[in-house]
Amino acid sequence: MTKQFYIYTFGCQMNVYDSDRLRDALIHNGWTLSSTPDTADLVVLNTCSVREKATDKVFSELGRIKKKKKDTTKIAVIGCVAKESGKEIYRRAPYVDYVYGPQAWHLLLHNLAKDFRDIDVDTHGVDKFDELPMATDTAAAAFVSIQEGCNHFCTYCIVPFTRGREVSRPFDKVMDEVRHLVKLGAIEINFLGQNVNNYQDDNGKNLADLVRETAKLDNVQRIRFTTSYPTCLTDELIDLYRTEPKLIPFIYLPIQAGGDKTLKRMNRRYTRDQYFAIIDKLKAANPNIQVSSDFIVGFPGESDADFEDTLDAVRRVRPIQSFSFKYSKRPHTGAALLPDQIDPDVAQDRLEKLQTLLKDIQREFNESCVGQKIKVLVEHVGRDNPNIIICRSENMQTVVLPKDESLIGKIIEVEITKANTTTLKGQLC
Ligand code: 5AD
Ligand code: SF4
């Protein structure tokens, strides 16, 4: 019987992408995917350390796996917790076999056959992608990682320490992967990177070049990119929202906080007015552009007035999707040393207020779509409800339709009949 593996994925879209690539590589090497970790011969945890809770989750999951696993099961902890905790993982969970940082997990493929423990948390750039086989299948909406790491050193963020400094994959290799995915049936390409709009390869090619080259492929109907840093959004890129109809009118552009004092202490390199000006430019390029954003509340020193600035910025920008978090103190980061850490109850209260406002805005926007005819990409059958199909609008809203599997992978026009905070209901036009 072939050996079976199971992968847990925590955290961001880049981890989802990495897990997919690892899954494909393991299958390529003769492994099969197990439906449960309990009987698997290899269990991989692809981890996130951006907030303390995310790290804690990994260790509690490891404890659960240990109780149920077979004696012979190998366990690998890969990704940002591996980088952050290193050998500490062996101390807290001595049954773990492999510990590989975000840029070293491809070593797992070489070392699985050997009977030893291995740890590598060094920074290897993006070489790992050269060692992986190409995907053998794809969803209609495909992801391509183009850039990793970050040079911004926002004072709350552990990413520059776990993913390392910014590195971009070569343009030609990215385009080879894009063409390959399109041949396999992808019609939407999502470029991924911690600072995706800062993509720059050694020959000077940038994200605008990638978008233009990808848009030339006939079968590609939608292009988007995640996550953008506000001041790295060049006029060249913004202009593509005017000139390139395949670039969908949606941008994930975290502001983090709405007050200048907090932004400065966070080492975000813009003021609230500069952020608003970028949004105005985007909307001038394409009035249909909608924004998604991240927010952190309870950052050290955040006063009531600073928090009000964040609420005010939300009312001004009206993000139609968002992720919002309480500040979490992370090792190595500048903010961990700042005075005036905020009382957890105050932070919780602020988070609830912020999320209420964000949800109201999201619901109002979704409700404004009722009665409209919009284009959606049909992605998959409902995971919890097999009688529906899940689609995505050009503004990245989730749209559900009655089940018709023949539509999966197609872009169709639907009329929106109902809406709530998270979901739109539609019918075929
Ligand atoms: N505490 C809380 N949220 C954080 N994020 C990053 N670091 C922290 C932290 N220390 C959030 C930011 C970022 C998202 C991925 O996670 O909002 O955009
Ligand atoms: Fe972290 Fe800031 Fe870099 Fe984003 S831009 S990964 S928040 S350091």
Image: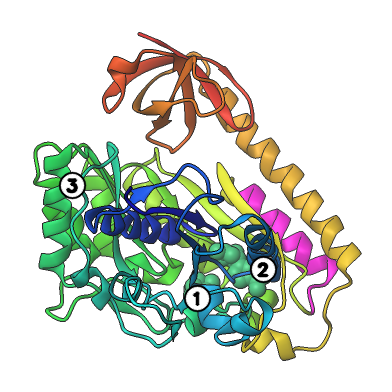
Residue 114 appears left or right of 91: left
Q: Nearer the viewer, residue 12 or 263?
A: 12
Disc 3 residue: CB within 8 Å of ligand 1: no
Image position, residue 292 (x, y; %): 51, 50
The amino acid pointed to by label 2 is: Phe
Select label 1 or label 2 by which is in front. 1
Q: Which residue is mark 3?
A: 181
The amino acid pointed to by label 3 is: Leu
Asked if residue 409 is among those painted magenta in the image, a careful observer would answer no
Image position, residue 278 (x, y; %): 44, 60
Identify the magenta region. 301-316
Query: What is the quadrant of residue 61 in the picture?
Result: bottom right
Q: Which residue is mark 1?
A: 97
Q: What's the magenta bit mostly, secondary-structure-wise?
A: helix
Q: Which residue is mark 2?
A: 59
* Local crowd size for mark 3, using a 10 Å CA cut-off: few (<14), some (14–19), many (≥20): many
Q: Nearer the viewer, residue 46 or 242?
A: 46
* Residue depicted at x 56% and y 63%: 71
Distance between the alpha carbons at the discs numbered 3 and 1 = 33 Å
Distance between the alpha carbons at the discs numbered 2 and 3 = 35 Å
Q: Nearer the viewer, residue 33 or 289?
A: 33
Q: Earlier in the sequence, mark 2 or mark 3?
A: 2
Dot 3 lies on which element?
A: helix
Residue 118, above or below 17: below
